[in-house]
């Protein structure tokens, strides 16, 4: 009924017409291209997977297993490749033989045909007490306000580029800034090397711009503090992390606008002549157990223009109004350190080779910095007030009144006794 099919013998495909042949050729070409692209995508996925696995292993080794490597890789939107960073030929890795110690990780990104290194994560371990100062208070070089791209009527004191550190909860756990979180493990008994406090800081450059990274960074810092404390024999109990970590306060507002660490100044100006005093403030939330507390005060543009004509001819001759408004505004900053941190403060004075340590129980002046001390519930406290030289001459004797008001408030709030204040000038 049916004729048997003849074998083709491996000959050419039957001719099915010009258009059908063209379609078949296009489909074959697309299929081959798809196989190539699919193969490349599969290889690229495999390579990325390998890079990430290698990165996690590197983080674990460099940071001595103290942090979740996946969480570190996930900072700032996620990194596929990381490498060790550090100064000089030796990369920075964590060790426990001597503190301070740190691990530094950079991410590699391919841009314009080359690999570019960007900061990804830094973990730093420090011990108190230690020979090197943990807190360095700079003199007038510490300009808290940015001066670039200011217009003729811009007010440079509206925002600070160096906001104060905020406490983690009530401050017992530590504090944080725009790009780092510090957790403090206080040892129940002195540990290795006489250590009484272990200070662990986790930093990531993106944290100042991406609030979502801040809680993750806090978890990394606390995780590392627990692990390092155990390895160093520091018995401690760390409080839990707070539910929220608001952004540090960069905007300065009218004095007394909000209740914070600048309340002492708001109370002072209510009972004093505020003629030449600052009219703007930016503080941090009050926390009874905070190891560090700061307040930034400044004279705004309108207040500066009002005060300047009231100065004596000699004072006006020494000052430049346009320079004050555009480059060097008038400001005051206080910083209080309590407990182990009180003995870890130094002042860096312009023109000196190394910072001068501040000795607890003493008071004085170093460059643009006034400092004093007291005892708060059995723990030492160091008080510092930085006032640039160009504003000290404007304040005159009011500067000593300011320091006394600042110290009196700290003593009342924290239950401090035995205040030692710098001599009046």
Image: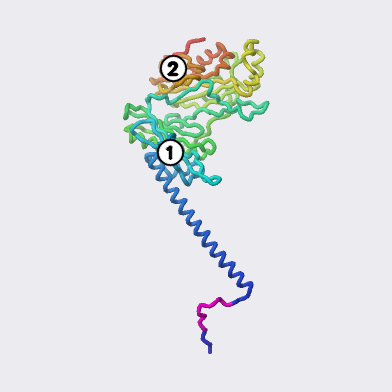
Q: Which residue is under mark 2?
A: 373
173, above or below 54, in the image = above
Nearest to the observer: residue 82 or residue 298: 82
Q: Secondary structure at mark 2?
A: strand
Q: Is residue 177 above or below residue 8?
A: above
Residue 20 lies, with reference to residue 283, above or below; the image says below
Choose between 306 and 95: the one closer to the eye. 95
Task: Determine which residue is flagged by label 1.
Answer: 220
Q: Residue at x 65, y 27 (%)?
A: 154
Residue 370 left/right relative to 343: right
Q: Residue 337, image x and y in percent?
A: 44, 23
For the record, the magenta segment spans: 6-14
Measure the alpha-carbon separation of dots 1 and 2. Answer: 34 Å
Mark 1 crowd level (few <14, some 14–19, many ≥20, 10 Å Cα): many
Which secondary structure, mark 1?
A: helix
> Does the magenta stretch mainly form a helix, a strand or a loop?
loop
Q: Position of residue 17 (x, y in %)?
A: 63, 75
């Amino acid at each position: 009924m049916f004729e048997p099919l003849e074998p083709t013998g491996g000959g050419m495909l039957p001719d099915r017409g010009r258009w059908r042949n063209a379609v078949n050729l296009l489909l074959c070409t697309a299929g081959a291209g798809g196989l190539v692209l699919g193969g490349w995508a599969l290889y690229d996925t495999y390579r990325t997977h390998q890079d990430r696995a290698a990165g996690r292993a590197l983080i674990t080794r460099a940071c001595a297993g103290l942090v979740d490597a996946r969480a570190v890789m996930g900072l700032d939107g996620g990194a596929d490749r990381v490498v060790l960073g550090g100064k000089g030929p030796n990369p920075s890795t964590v060790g426990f033989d001597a503190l301070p110690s740190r691990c530094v990780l950079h991410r590699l990104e391919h841009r314009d045909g080359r690999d570019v290194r960007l900061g990804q994560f830094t973990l730093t371990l420090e011990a108190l007490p230690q020979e090197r100062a943990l807190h360095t208070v700079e003199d007038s070089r510490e300009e808290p306000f940015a001066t670039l791209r200011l217009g003729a009527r811009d007010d440079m004191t509206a925002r600070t580029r160096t906001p104060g550190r905020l406490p983690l909860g009530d401050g017992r756990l530590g504090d944080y800034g725009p790009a780092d979180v510090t957790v403090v493990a206080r040892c129940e008994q002195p540990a290795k090397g006489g250590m009484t406090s272990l200070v662990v800081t986790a930093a990531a450059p993106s944290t100042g711009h991406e609030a979502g990274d801040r809680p993750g960074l806090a978890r990394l810092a606390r995780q590392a503090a627990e692990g390092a404390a155990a390895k160093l024999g520091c018995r401690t109990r760390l409080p839990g992390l707070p539910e929220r970590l608001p952004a540090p306060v960069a905007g300065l507002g009218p004095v007394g606008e909000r209740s914070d660490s600048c309340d002492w100044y708001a109370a002072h100006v209510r009972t004093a002549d505020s003629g030449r005093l600052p009219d703007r403030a930016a503080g941090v939330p009050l926390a009874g157990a905070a190891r560090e507390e700061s307040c930034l005060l400044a004279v705004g543009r309108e207040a500066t223009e009002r005060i300047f004509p009231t100065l004596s001819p000699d004072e006006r001759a020494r000052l430049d109004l346009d320079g004050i408004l555009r480059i060097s505004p008038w400001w005051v900053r206080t910083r209080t350190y309590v407990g182990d941190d009180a003995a870890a403060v130094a002042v860096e004075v312009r023109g000196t080779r190394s910072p001068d340590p501040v000795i607890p129980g003493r008071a004085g002046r170093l460059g643009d910095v006034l400092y004093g001390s007291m005892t708060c519930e059995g723990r030492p406290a160091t008080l510092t007030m930085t006032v640039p030289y160009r504003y000290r001459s404007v304040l005159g004797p009011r500067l000593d009144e300011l320091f006394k008001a600042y110290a009196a408030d700290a003593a009342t709030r924290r239950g401090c006794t035995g205040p030692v204040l710098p001599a009046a000038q």
